Every structure is written in structure tokens, then in C-alpha cells.
Amino acid sequence: MADPLVLLHGFTQTGAAWDAVRERLAGREVHAPDLRGHGARAADRPIDTPTLVADVLDAAPRRFDLAGYSMGGRLALHVALAAPGRVRRLTLIATTAGIQDPGEARRRREADEALAQLLEREGLEAFADRWEALPLWDRQSAEQRARARAMRLAQDPAGLAASLRGFGAGTMPPVWDRLRTLSLPVTIVVGSEDARYRDVARRLHRAMPWARVVVVAGAGHGLPLEAPGALARALEAR
């Protein structure tokens, strides 16, 4: 029997972002929690790397498979590194191990701070308009865009702002130099049309040459919404 599976969602999402994937994992024990700053945990503070890691480990089964998308993938790496004896398999979906260059990290923190201030000043619709203009979402259908927007507009602006400040990519400690210490099966999943994260996936694979790489044909960055069937197959493969 397969181990329980914990799925960690991306920024502006909730555990419900995995619903279409869960439907394709019939019979599997799946946990898809809302992360701090999002959904049912929008008001929970603090939001920082150690606290988020502790949240996942406190709620997860004793041994489990772990997968994370984008922001959730960054968190999944930290969880696996913190508790290697509990994570059986790791799937990293359209994600990174952090920003190593100090100047690039500072610029990302500044950009995230500007987004946080936009959320606090102008609210969710103005933020969603700017977020949805990013080229990351160019491959999404109108239906997928509408679903993603509805999830964003249901969030709490203060929660998203706190998430950006406490666990943005420029704030999260990078872990590239620790990847070689992972001694568990790893799968790296990326969309064929997600040029930015295809490059990151190649770098992740160089750091973990034992990892399996899955490229989802025709998909962009938003894989849980764009390609739930392909993700379910990647999660079930052994």
C-alpha cells in the first residue's frame, strides 16, 4: 500500500487547488492543508520557514510521501531536509531551492514588499490583476484562469502580504548546497512551456542526479490546474 501523501499548495492558493489531482488518486490517503497566510489559516502568525516546516510535520502522518508546487515546493524541500526519516518520497513541482545571489534575493524581497503593500493599499482585485499579468500563466485556459482568480479573490489580503514578507522566495533561506544530502527518491516535474522553471529543473537535476525528471507536454507553470492527470501519474509512479 502506498504511503500517505501530503500536498503543499502554491502562493495565493489553498489545499483545494489539489482537488482535481486528488480525484485521480482514488484510494490514496491524501492530505492537502492550507498553509499559513492562506485559506483557513490566513490569520495564523508568524509566517516564516521554521514555523511552516513545523506546521507540516505536526499535521502529517508519521511516514509520508511529500509533494509541493511552486511556493509549496520550496517548503517541501525544507520539510524533507528537516525530517529525512519521515519523508519517503519527494516530488518538486515547478519550484526552486531558493535564490543564492544576495543582490537577486534583495531585489525579490523588494518586489514582494511592493506586492504586499499593494495588497494592503488597494486590495485583492488590484493585486490579482497584476499577478495574473505575469507570463507564468500564459498557457492557462480561460476556465483555468477563472478558477485561479476565484481562489485568489477568496484570500485575505493581510494573509497574502504576510506570506510574501515571511516566506517569499527572496526571504526563504536557499538550500542548493544541501540537496546532495537528500537520500530519498525525488521527482522533479515541470511544464514544457514554463521556460523559467525548466531551467531551474535542470539545475535541480544537476544537484540531484538520481532524481527523475518529468516534463509535462504543453503545460505552463500552473500545473495543478493545467495538468492534474499528468501530476497524478507522476505522484503514483514508482
Image (cartoon, helix red, strand yellow):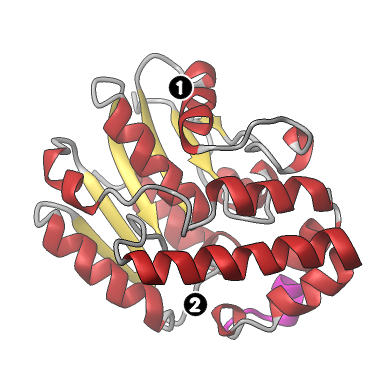
Q: Quadrant of the C terminus?
A: top left
Q: Position of residue 25 (x, y in %)?
A: 50, 42
Residue span colored magenta: 139-145
Residue 176, image x, y percentages: 23, 53
Q: Earlier in the sequence, mark 2 or mark 1?
A: 1
**Disc 1 element:** helix
Residue 25 located left or right of residue 178: right
Q: Give the image location of residue 152, x and y in percent.
A: 78, 60
Could you tell me the amino acid type at mark 2?
Gly
Q: Looking at the image, is 130 positioned above or below residue 57?
A: below
Query: If the image is split into quadrants, where does the N terminus sit?
Result: top left
Label ID, residue 172: none
Instruction: Give the number of the disc on residue 220.
Output: 2
- The verdict on residue 146 being magenta is no
Q: Nearer the viewer, residue 115 or 89?
A: 115
Viewer-closest of 134 and 157: 157
Density class for disc 2 (Cα within 10 Å; few <14, some 14-19, many ≥20) is many
Q: Residue furthest top?
A: 62
- Between 189 and 164, the one lying in front of the other is 164
The answer to whether residue 123 is visible is: no
At 70% from the left edge and 67% from the top edge, which residue is drawn?
115
Q: Which residue is mark 1?
A: 57
Q: CA distance from mark 2 to mark 1?
A: 30 Å
Residue 14 shows in this picture: yes
Q: Position of residue 232 (x, y in %)?
A: 45, 51
The residue nearer to you, when weighing 231 against 79, is: 79
Image quarter for residue 10? bottom right
Q: In percent of the image, x 68 and y 81: which residue is there?
A: 141
Left or right for 79, reference 107: left
Mark 2 element type: loop
Amino acid type, residue under disc 1 in the picture: Leu
